[in-house]
Structures are given as C-alpha cells and as structure tokens.
Amino acid sequence: MFEVEKRLEACGVQMEAILETAMALYVPHGVPPSEAKGRIGVKIQKALQDANVSSLLIGAILLEDELYRKRKSSEIADDPVFLLSDEIIGMAIAEYIGGTCARFEFTRYDQKKPGILSSLGPFLDDAVAGLIAGCTSRFYSEGL
C-alpha cells in the first residue's frame, strides 16, 4: 500500500534486514527460528498492505527526511529525550498490529536496537521497531 516497501528500501531498509532484526530478539517457544522467520515475514508483508500501518510508516519517513536528514545541524540528531513523536509513532504501529502486549515488545526492540534499527534515524528506527514488535507480538499471541 502506498508503495511503502519501495519507500523503505529507498531509505536503506530492506525486507531481509527487517526480518533479521525481528529474529535478533526472537524468543523460542516451540517454533523453530526458521519457521518463525517465515511466519513473521508473512505478518510483516500483510501489515505493509494496511493503509494505517503504511501511512504511519510514510509519516516517519517524511519526518525523518524533513527534520533529520535535510538539516545540517538537526536539533534531533542525537534523538533527545524531549522528542516523543518518534516513540508515539512506533508505539502506535506496534499496538495497532499487535494490541497492548505489543507495547512491551516495542520497548524491547527500542531499547536494544538490534540489526537495522541501530543504523536508522530517530523516526525510522522507532517506526520499523513498531512494525516488528506488532508482528512478533501477534505471532507470539497466536501461538499460545
């Protein structure tokens, strides 16, 4: 939807990197990692087709471009504590996909910043973490 996958790729965020990041904090619970990776990948692809998830991701892409990349001395270059909108976008994506439990999964990915998350700016790292957290949380919940 809205070519969000292409837009993410243009920002250096490939689907394989998203999946590798998701698996970096995977908690085994009877599903082998190789099977879990495929099932989580399906959930991510489905989420990317949702207009609400896609629009929030595009919002993060545009905010990052406008407030972070285009500014030589961006006030948010170090992701300061007063910047909350990036966290709000990430939590909104996570909770929309995976419900309340996904907020806690988002916190795990946001704090550890595994994989691709460590190389993204303040908006995209949280938006992608929200996408991953929503999908992994839903995967865990459906497996119970």
Image (cartoon, helix red, strand yellow):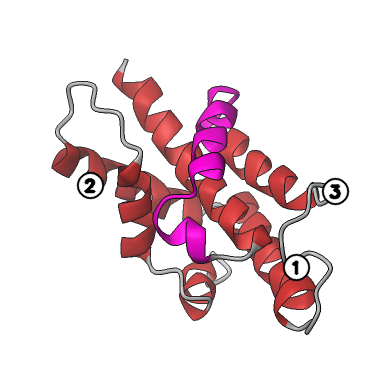
Q: Quadrant of the C terminus?
A: top left
Residue 126 seen in the figure: yes
Magenta segment boundaries in residue numbering: 97-119
Q: Going 43% across and 30% down the picture, which residue do you hit?
A: 138
* Cβ atoms under marks 1 and 2 closer than 8 Å: no
Whether residue 100 appears in magenta in the rendering, the answer is yes
Q: Secondary structure at mark 3?
A: loop
Which residue is label 1 attached to?
Answer: 63
What residue type is disc 2 on?
Gly
At which x and y percent is residue 132?
A: 46, 45
Labels 2 and 3: the sequence-earlier one: 2
> In this rendering, is residue 119 above or below 47?
below
Task: Tell me which residue sits at (37%, 52%) in the image.
Answer: 21
Q: Nearer the viewer, mark 2 or mark 3?
A: 3
Q: Residues within 10 Å of mark 2 (few under 14, many from 20)?
A: few
Where residue 2 appears, as percent x and y from the top left, is 58, 69
SS assignment for the magenta stretch, majority: helix
SS class of the residue under badge 1?
helix
Distance, label 1 to label 2, CA atoms, is: 31 Å
In three-dimensional space, the C-alpha distance between marks 1 and 3, rounded to whole angstroms, equals: 16 Å
Looking at the image, tell me whether mark 1 or mark 2 is earlier in sequence order: 2
Q: Is residue 6 magenta?
A: no
* Residue under label 2: 38
Going from N to C along the chain, the mark reached first, 1 or 3, is 1
Look at label 1 and name its amino acid: Leu
**Callout 3 amino acid:** Phe
Residue 71 is drawn in which quadrant?
bottom right
Query: Which mark is nearer the camera, 1 or 2?
Result: 1
Q: State the separation of the CA atoms marked 2 and 3.
A: 37 Å
Reading the image, the residue beneath label 3 is: 82
